[in-house]
Image (spheres, rainbow, N blue to C red):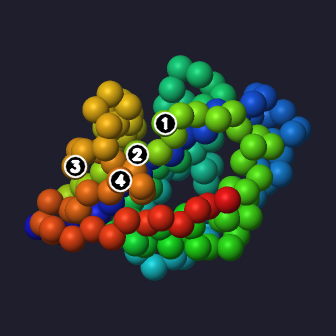
Amino acid sequence: MNYHLAQLNIARFRLPQDHPVNSDFIDNLDRVNAIAESQEGFVWRLTGEGNNALDVNAFDDPNVAANMSVWKSLEALGAFVYRNKEHREIMRRRNEWFDKIDFYLVLWWIEEGHTPTLEEAKAKLEWLVSQGPTAQAFSFKNPFPAPNSDVINPVIDECA
């Protein structure tokens, strides 16, 4: 059986999403999402009514935005997150738009062909918060190998 890597990352806007201070972030979403989709190893990403997931209310707080995607490997996701220039440039500005959240990212392995749900992703984030990094839910800093592998190479780059 083959596995892919699922990820959920969340961010809480400092001000309501439609506030003008957030326009530069929102105006760049389509561009950055298109870059993600063109990356080697990209499989799938969550979208709502438009080309992004800003209208998907994954949490009770309307200022929390969720981004969920699937990648062929930890290395493929890491290459986009940490080494893609356009993504890094936007993420370096995240403090302009978002509050700090202690647990904002969770990674987990899924069977190839499975599309994760938001409920699944939220449960994985809750698991990471309550149990710490395990094979069930982990982070870039504390990764676990896919169930069919014994090898994992941590991604230790910094986004910003």
Q: How much space separates mark 4 and mark 1, taking CA atoms?
A: 13 Å
| Label 4–label 1 contact, CB within 8 A | no
Above or below, 34 against 63 in this view is below
Q: Residues within 10 Å of mark 1 (few under 14, many from 20)?
A: some
Q: How much space separates mark 1 and mark 3, taking CA atoms?
A: 17 Å
Q: Which residue is mark 2?
A: 106
Q: Residues within 10 Å of mark 2 (few under 14, many from 20)?
A: many
> Residue furthest toward the top?
60
Amino acid type, callout 1:
Phe
Instruction: In the rendered structure, find residue 4 and report the number of the disc placed on it.
Output: none
Q: Which residue is mark 1?
A: 103
Residue at figure coordinates x 25%, y 45% from the top left: 134
In percent of width and height, residue 2 lies at: 17, 68
Instruction: In the rendered structure, find residue 135 and report the number of the disc placed on it.
Output: 3
Q: Secondary structure at mark 1?
A: loop
Q: Which residue is mark 4?
A: 142
Above or below, 136 against 151 in this view is above
Q: Secondary structure at mark 3?
A: loop
Amino acid type, callout 4:
Asn
| Label 3–label 2 contact, CB within 8 A | no
Q: Nearer the viewer, mark 4 or mark 1?
A: 4
Q: Nearer the viewer, mark 3 or mark 4?
A: 4
> Residue furthest toward the bottom?
40
Q: How much space separates mark 2 and mark 4, taking CA atoms?
A: 11 Å
For marks 2 and 4 on the same chain, the one whose residue lies earlier in the sequence: 2
For marks 4 and 1 on the same chain, the one whose residue lies earlier in the sequence: 1
For marks 3 and 2 on the same chain, the one whose residue lies earlier in the sequence: 2
| Label 1–label 3 contact, CB within 8 A | no
Q: How much space separates mark 3 and mark 2, taking CA atoms?
A: 11 Å
